[in-house]
Image (cartoon, rainbow, N blue to C red):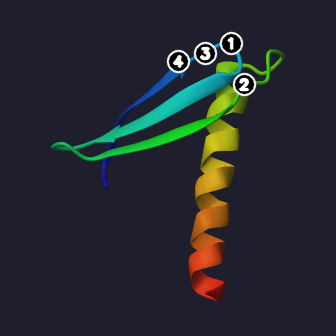
Amino acid sequence: MLLKNINVAQTTDTTVTVEFKGEGNDLITVRMSADPGSSEDQTVAAALAMIDQLREFKQTA
């Protein structure tokens, strides 16, 4: 997927959503617990870390 845009949105008081938008209709969405002290860059890094953990899980399963 060729990444075109990243959107970070406070979904609720306790959750944040990060959307990784690619070419065409490609979309990866990560919804996670919100950390009020985190910057947008830190939130994106946390979402990418979650995706990496899923990739590692797939390799060991």
Q: Mark 2 or 1, which is nearer the eye? A: 1
Element at badge 4?
Answer: strand
Sequence-wise, the earlier of marks 2 and 4 is: 4
Q: CA distance from mark 1 to mark 3?
A: 4 Å
Query: What is the spatial separation of the Cα atoms under label 2 and label 3, in whole angstroms?
Result: 8 Å
> Quick one: label 4, few (<14), some, or many (20+) residues within 10 Å?
few
Measuring 79% from the left and 24% from the top, which residue is drawn there? 35
Q: Quadrant of residue 19?
A: top left
Residue 50 at x, y = what percent?
65, 52
Residue at image coords 79%, 15%: 36
What kind of residue is marked 4? Ala
Kindly indicate the quadrant of the structure image that contains residue 14. top right
Earlier-in-chain disc, 2 versus 3: 3
Whether the residues at callouts 2 and 1 have beta carbons within 8 Å, the answer is: yes
Q: Amino acid at mark 1?
A: Asp
Placement of 42 over or under 29, stated as above or below: above
Q: Amino acid at mark 2?
A: Ala
How many residues crowd around disc 3 within 10 Å: few (fewer than 14), some, or many (20 or more)? few
Of tags 2 and 3, which is closer to the observer? Answer: 3
Q: Which residue, given by chain and number where applicable, does mark 2 sit on?
A: 34
Q: Do callouts 2 and 3 mark residues in contact (Cβ within 8 Å)? A: yes
Residue under numbered circle 4: 9
Asked if labels 3 and 1 touch by Cβ distance under 8 angstroms, the answer is yes
Gap between marks 1 and 4, in whole Å?
Answer: 11 Å
Which mark is drawn over residue 13?
1
Q: Quadrant of the N terminus?
A: bottom left
